[in-house]
Amino acid sequence: MTARTLTCHVSAVEDLTPDVFRVHLEGRAEAMAHAPGQYLELKLEEDIWVPFSIANAHRGDGTIELHIQHWPEHENSQRLRELILDSGVLTVRLPGGECRLDPDSSRPLLLIAAGTGFAQMKALLEAALAADQALPVSFWWAVRERRDFYLESLARTWAETHANFSFHAVAETPLEPGFDSERVTGHQGRIDEVLAANLENVSAYDVYLSGSPGMVYACIDTLKPLGLNPERVFSDVFTYAPRESSPHP
């Protein structure tokens, strides 16, 4: 899809945690079209565009969801929040990104996110779960502490309603007893170390990663000895922060 610049209306803003808020945008349905996993750029100033993963699969109704990390101590973050809350209208450019769900693949899915990287995974998961009720989908979400699972209830709902879906919650601090439930498992530690301790063979999987470059490449280094297929691993990090030694992992 060719990127388009358009004006969207802010239909709702919701604080999910003290650090993360959700924004709902509305625009012309055909102009808001995107593939699961793509992102948009939001215009902050004349020459400043800020990218955000689109947190929903294309619905055909002109709506888009964003999950935004708020850093009050950062000037641009504060200006962005004020712009969203005060203007009611935003200029965006979309779609962007090559980390898209492959609709022709029948391989099981391994999705790994850190923090608000959940947004991109949410769009991929919505599309994947709607398309195939039998394809195995394993979702790993890494955060610092329990409260940072800002849409934990949604991940639990997927686990309750989709027998092919499993949710692995990874926190740096201990998760309280009773966290686990059917197809929901809690882990403590750093995401790459937790993956190493719990996975055996990923050669059959399509792997999608969303997080900082350091997190993404650490996970890739962990998965390589477990059979990771470099042709079947996807992340926006490969575009904006490629490793010097290779254009891919």
Image (cartoon, rainbow, N blue to C red):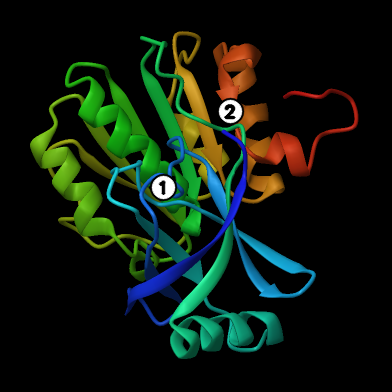
**Image vertical order of residue 230 relative to residue 151, above or below:** above
Give the residue at x 39% y 23%.
109
Q: Nearer the viewer, residue 4 or 205?
A: 4
**Image vertical order of residue 58 relative to residue 101, above or below:** below
Give the residue at x 46% y 48%.
31
Q: Nearer the viewer, residue 218 or 90?
A: 90
Q: Nearer the viewer, residue 242 or 139?
A: 242
Name the side, left or right, on which 123 lies relative to 135.
right
* Residue 225 x/y as whole percent: 62, 16
Name the residue type under label 2. Phe
**Which quadrant holds residue 46?**
bottom right
Helix, strand or loop status at disc 1: strand
* Residue 118 x/y as whole percent: 43, 51
Residue 196 shows in this picture: no
- Near mark 1 (Cα within 10 A), the count class, few <14, some 14-19 or many ≥20, is many
Number of labels in the image equals 2
Q: Which residue is mark 1?
A: 141
Quadrant (top left, top right, bottom left, bottom right) of the C terminus:
top right
